[in-house]
Amino acid sequence: MGLSVSEVAVDLPGARLVGGTATRINGLTYDSRKVRQGDLFVCIKGFVYDGHSFADQAKEKGAAALLVERELPVTLPQIVVDDARRNMGVVAARLYGHPSRQLRVIGVTGTNGKTTTTYLIRSIMQEAGRKCGLLGTIEQTVGADHAAEAPRTTPESADIQRLLREMVTNGCTTATMEVSSHSLVLHRTVGTEFDVAVYTNLTQDHLDFHRSLEDYRAAKGLLFRSLVSTNGDGGKARKCSVINGDDSNAHYFMQVTTVAKLVYGLSEGCDVRADNVRVEPDGVWYTLHTPCGHRDVHLRLTGRFNVYNSLAAIAVGVHEGIDLDTIVRGIERTVVPGRFEPVDEGQAFSVIVDYAHTPDSLENVLQTARALCKGRIITIIGAGGDRDKGKRPLMGEVAATLSDFVIVTSDNPRSEEPARICQDVAEGVKRHPTPYDVVLDRRDAIRRSVGLAQPGDLVLIAGKGHEDYQELDGRKIHFDDREEVRKALQELAQGGVY
């Protein structure tokens, strides 16, 4: 890596150069605290801070040049553009040698199922002998022994390009990543050339950020609009949109894409289809039908929703030319942390931890739980602070409709009062006669749930899944639902009373 200011700016339409254009740039950052000698510092206007205010600090730490939206009184070369955030991805891709052009990049978008689908895709690729990196909600994996916790679902564009370059360096040939609607609107995927786009589903979420469900859908559609096949690009023209044909928004995504399509679902006419579906506590069985043949499948993941997630991944594998037996082996060995994850300490009832944090995902999980449970369902739910408030009563209503007892508690309150969030959720619970309780402390709520459970019951702890923290008043404290329920179950076995 290492380009002059003029070389960096060559791909930026309308860019204006100020100062020494021959100055060499060795890296890039948008965080003034992380500036290294020779970096290009990108001045992004955020929701709270404006990066232009930190240009002097970046210079003191060794920044070689600035990418700005207005010329600053700082004695450094400057590239002036209309939108620094949007152009950051273009610059980062150039600095890192366009790593996405050296990988098959598979983006997965949708309200629910992104994480599981990316895990299934990676498993298929690995079964086929292809090293596959993964960027998502749980982890960022750039090689066999190179995994880190993910700070957000989809990283900033500069971080994506750095991570993709690390994948290439570590021998990866494929990358699969979760693509959030936020990331598409905020230009985080700019500079990344996708080969396959996967659409899972669309239900209410993030309406604190998007003005409407139509805007939310249009944001996800940006991923599919970005797929453009060209000739003479070394095989990168094999582009495809993989679309859930059973989803009510399928037609929209079929219209906005201009590349080949593979449609999956349970309906007749889908290219990749499942029938004879059987959902059991230890997994799902179904018969798979594809253009390449038919197979019997047994997933270690359970729930009808995971039939759809697996079909999406299978469709990707089919498009990528992987033989069907390899595809099936790959999906059959997949497990995903915090997604309908059982916690067993020998108790006479079931405990499930799941990331479900939208009305639709909660409904899917509870319907699966109901099909598997012979006794009562006791559900713990909350809602994140500083996020879509409209879904809170909907979450409560879904829980009350499909559970026998509901405990409303804190999730990640962030800057909001936990009691206020719980009140919003409880408004939905109260629309049904289902008994409920409000227990603000999540640890106490978990202890209460296992104390209520009788043999044959099922306790669902929803909302946080794999997360091992809670966000409170700008702080992150360690909190893992799986750890807490194990402690509660052990105490219960020793005679504890809640």
Image: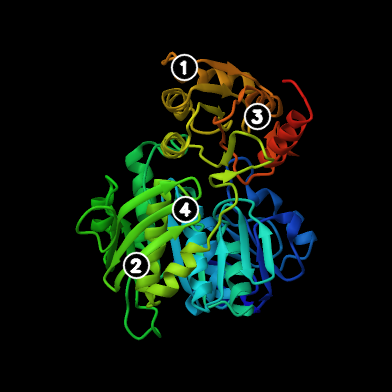
> Badge 4: how crowded within 10 Å, few (<14), some, or many (20+)?
many
Amino acid marked by disc 2: Arg
Amino acid marked by disc 3: Ser
Using residue 326 as the reference point, say whether residue 271 is left or right of it. left
Mark toward the start of the polypeptide (3 vs 4): 4
Q: Nearer the viewer, mark 4 or mark 2?
A: 2
**Residue tagged 3:** 415
Q: CA distance from mark 1 to mark 2?
A: 42 Å
| Disc ID at residue 114 | 4
Using residue 485 as the reference point, say whether residue 181 is left or right of it. left
- To which quarter of the image does residue 459 belong? top right
**Residue tagged 2:** 295
Q: Nearer the viewer, mark 4 or mark 1?
A: 1
Mark toward the start of the polypeptide (3 vs 1): 3
Secondary structure at badge 4 equals helix
Residue 415, placed above or below residue 80:
above
Secondary structure at badge 2 equals strand
Q: Nearer the viewer, mark 3 or mark 2?
A: 2
Residue for point 69% across, 55% down: 31
Residue for point 29% across, 74% down: 292
> Badge 2: how crowded within 10 Å, few (<14), some, or many (20+)?
some
